[in-house]
Structure formats: C-alpha cells, structure tokens
Amino acid sequence: MRQAERREEAPEITPQVLHLRDLLKWVRQGRIRVPNFQRDFTWDRQRMLNLFDSIRKQYPIGTLLFWESTKPLPMSDRLGPLSLPSSAGGKLLVLDGQQRLTTLAGVLLLDELERSPADDRDPARWIIHYDAAADGFAYFDDDPPLSAVRVSELMGTKGLYNAAQSIMGAPGQVPDTETRSRWMERIESVSAALAAYRIPLVIFATDSLRLAVESFTRVNRSGQSLGPDEMFSALTYKVDDEQETFRLAKQIDSILAEIVRTGFGEMERVVVLRSVLLAAELDPFRTEWDQLAEETRRDATTRLPAAIKEAREGLLRAVEFLRAEGIRNKRLLPYSMQIVGLAAFFGRRDGAPTEKQKALLRRWLWVSGFTEGFGGLNPSRILLQLKDLREVIPNQDAPVTVEGIDLDAPAHPFPERHDHRSARVRALLCVMLRERVLGPDGAPIDPEKMASDVLQRGPQALARVCVRVQNRGKAPLMSSPANRVFDVTPGKRGQAKTWLLAIDPSIRSTVLQSHHVSEEAWKALVEDDHRAFVEERIKTLMNLERRFMEEKGVVPPKADRPAPSAIDVEDEVPLSDDA
C-alpha cells in the first residue's frame, strides 16, 4: 500500500519544445496563469530588450517550467500588462520563467488582449521596436524613426506588409531605396527568427505543490531559476478552500516597498528573506529548501507570520540607524549582511537601545566594513555574529563584544582600485560624504544630494580627474579612488581636472578642501604631474579615514600603502556546510 501511494505521489513530467507562436496561443486561450505565490514582474527595460535580442540570434533563453494541478488554487488573472481571458479547461501555472514569459506575452500580445488596469508603473516598457537602421531593439520616447517597426508587428505577414508599405512608400529621397531595402531585409530576418524560435518547457502534473517545486529544482539547470526567496515562498504557501491564507513573497514585496519609501533604495530580496529566516530561527544561508523535512517545514511555516513582523520592524529601524551613521542608501552600505545583523538586534530589542548598545553597534558596523569582515568569513562565523546580535546583545545594557568577529582587528589598507563592488571602497565613500562638497562656483552641495546621486548613478557619480597616470611599480594609480572626485558638473563631458584648474582663486582653497584635494596635490595637477597628484591625494584620504576610524573605534591599517580589496557580492556568500 505504501509503495502504491508513493507511486501515485510521483509527478507526471512532460518535456516538450514549443514554437513561440504556439506558446502565445496558450496565453490567448487563458490556459497559462501565474500562481499567487509568485512575485510580480521585476525586469527592467534593458533585460526585456536583451531577451528579444537573444531570440533574434536564436540563443537559448532557458526552459519554462509549468505546474498542472487538478485542484483549484489562487492565481492571477493578469500577465504583465494583459488581462487574461477566462478558460474552462485546465490551467498551467508558471513555476519558473515568469519574467521571460511575461516579457514575451506583454510585448507581442499587447494589442490583442485587454489591458490590465493594474499595469501602471511603466506602461511604455511593453512597446518595443526593432530599429533596422541601428540593427537592434529599442525604446523611443518620441515618434519612432522610419526604420523602426513594433516587434508585435513582426509575428505575422500583415505586420510585415504594413512595415514594407510604410518604409518603401514614405515620401522623399532620403534615405535612398537601397538603404530602405536593406532595412526591410533586416526586418524580414528578425520576423523569420521570431517565427522559427522554439522554447523548451516542462510540465509537472501533480496536486502537490511541494512535489512540483522539489521536482523542478532538480530538473532545471538553465534559464533564470527561482531564487531562494521564491522557492521558500512556494514551499510555505498556504491556501484553504481556494482562499490564500499566507504568501511569503507578498510579505517580502511589502517590506521592500517600505524600505524604498525611506529613500534607502531597493534592497535585494534575499536580504529580507535572510532577516525573516533568522527571526524564524532558521538557517539564513540555506538554499535547498526542498530538502527540508516535512515536519520541520510545517513548523517553520507556523513561525513565519511572527518572524515577518520581527524582520520588518528590525529592518526599518536598521535603516534609520544606518542613515544616522552616514550610510544613506544601499549603494553606500559596505555589506548587505550588515543590515541583516542590525535588523536582528532591532527586531528583538524592545524600546530604544542603551548608549552602550548603540556604541557597540557602531563599532561593529564600521569594523566589519573596514576590515572586510564578511568577505572572507564562512557562514558559520557570520551566523555567530547574527545570533549574538539577536539573542544576546539586545538583553545586555553594556555589551562590549560581538561573537564571531575580532573588533580589534586592523582595518584593510586603503583600496587600490575604485570599484563600487568593494565594501572597502563603499566605506571610503561614506567617510568622504560626511561633509558637503562645493561646486566649481563655490555653491554647497548637501551630502544627502551626493549620496542620492551615488544611489542613482553608481560609479558614474564620481568623475575621473586624470586620464593618464604613470604607475609607480605595479600600483594602478589611474584606477585609484584618489583619482576620482564627486561629479559636481553632471552632463559636462571631460575629466574633472578641467574644472579643478579653472576654479576662481578667491574660492579655490575652500572648494579643493571640500573635495579633499591638498595644496600639494593641486600644484602637481597644475604641473601635469598626474602621478604626484594621485599619490598626494591618497595621503589626504588615508589621513581622513584614520581620523574617522579613531572616532568609531576601528584599529587603523598596519600598512600605509594601498592594497587590492575583495570584490564583495553579498548574494554570493558561501553556503552553509549543512545547507
């Protein structure tokens, strides 16, 4: 009997390959749906363009994975900008490939199906053109040029005919007939590529969501697979009598939106997930949730509502603490794990922290940032810090240590390269933004404005001073952070050296000082001694950092020369040994 039950539980797996036009037919019929536990559409315009470019070149875009169940489940009646028609037949729920499928259907069926009133964030993103003159896919804010045709027009002969009539029949001799004919050849080639494109898909037929998720995590090795937050959300999704009772993805979306409203920027979903998991007393580094025992999974699910409340409170208070410390947005945060640690403390701390607690949190924050404290640690050491911050320190009025980190470790040397992926570089930017900078005319620019510029523009918010710098030994001086100043003349081409040399002598000293450019460095710049300029500014910035470190209780670096710093992508923190 038990063997028979196990055989009945096994999902029926049907792999197949479908032409793009046939996949769109399923969407028109209302056969495809997005389950409610999935997150919303998140792709930006560039990723949408890249998808169509891959199809045009016949590159694989990954396998689409669907779940077919006989049980009714809460599902969305929209797909991107489209309102899906009702269908009496069985439904295919998208488990993996939602972003790709939504992009294809939203762009190619925009004029065929009814528009959803919920699509109001960026309605124009669904109107993609193929520009034959540029030989690429593009968006146009104004009227598209003669050489451009809507991608949705390329799926049929009628659209091709209309494009030919428009291009070849347009009045005027410019461009010439030969050029227009070349445009049409390119357009016909793209149309043929869309018509010929085939997409692999797998359908898992089972009434068990758990089995569906477990199965496809083992099968899928291409495309853009579910992240740990989406997998965990699917496995903890709860529904009673066709009514949704719990959806983690929705809660994560809500917390992310609240963080964005503070001006801190949009954090990675995995950051919120890790805060929730920590609050639920689960391993925040685990990814293979499909291997979690059923009893443990049910127990974890019951703890999630309280954990979400704790994580939300902790994250919002952590953002407030970070902003008070001069870390004004996510691009200035050395490590994403730092906000998880702060959230662990603030989520459990009732009321305001003591002065001694705040002092320890400040020291831990800056020591971990300047020592690259999360870059080389294994998850077990990081977990020691997180648990201490959550379980012990909130109950101590005068804590002085954090388990798992040496607060007396010296800081990593001054960073050798200007790379915003480096936690060490982000820590330096925070120090540089403690005071306002002045524009070329002496007008002050508030640090909040400059921090916002970093959030919006990333590395481009700082301008290179010297284009060519002779190295001393192996030190890449041209790439040094000391060869960058905050871009206070956005939109103007050319290196920052131009405006630095043109500052009015009456205000030169104060303007240069606000950008941490010493008199010696400026004289070197005047003499075109770029190496001396960078080396002098390195000294100035090192001294600036040392004063800051002394204030925050960070032991300064032992070395007085720049050194390579680790490239830190928090999402790639090593997994737990027992994950």
Image (cartoon, rainbow, N blue to C red):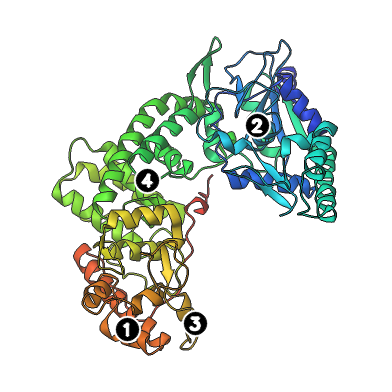
Q: Which residue is mark 2?
A: 106
Asked if one can make out residue 225 in the rendered structure from this viewpoint, the answer is: yes
430 vs 370, nearest the viewer: 430
| Outermost front residue | 172
Label 3: element kind: loop
Q: Which residue is mark 4?
A: 340
Q: Tag 1: Cα neighbours inside 10 Å, few (<14), some, or many (≥20)?
A: many
133 vs 314, nearest the viewer: 133
Could you say where residue 6 lies in the image, as x and y percent from the top left?
A: 71, 22
- Give the residue type that dot 4 points to: Val
Could you say where residue 498 lies in the image, as x and y percent from the top left?
A: 40, 76
Name the quadrant containing residue 152.
top right
Q: Nearer the viewer, mark 4 or mark 1?
A: 1
Question: What's the CA distance linking mark 4 and mark 2?
Answer: 36 Å
Tell me what residue is drawn at x 34 percent, y 63 percent: 429
Q: Of label 3 and label 2, which has the lower sequence position?
A: 2
Label for residue 468?
3
Question: What's the CA distance linking mark 4 and mark 3?
Answer: 41 Å
Badges 4 and 2: C-beta atoms under 8 Å apart? no
Asked if one can make out residue 377 in the rendered structure from this viewpoint, the answer is: no
Question: What's the CA distance linking mark 1 and mark 2?
Answer: 55 Å
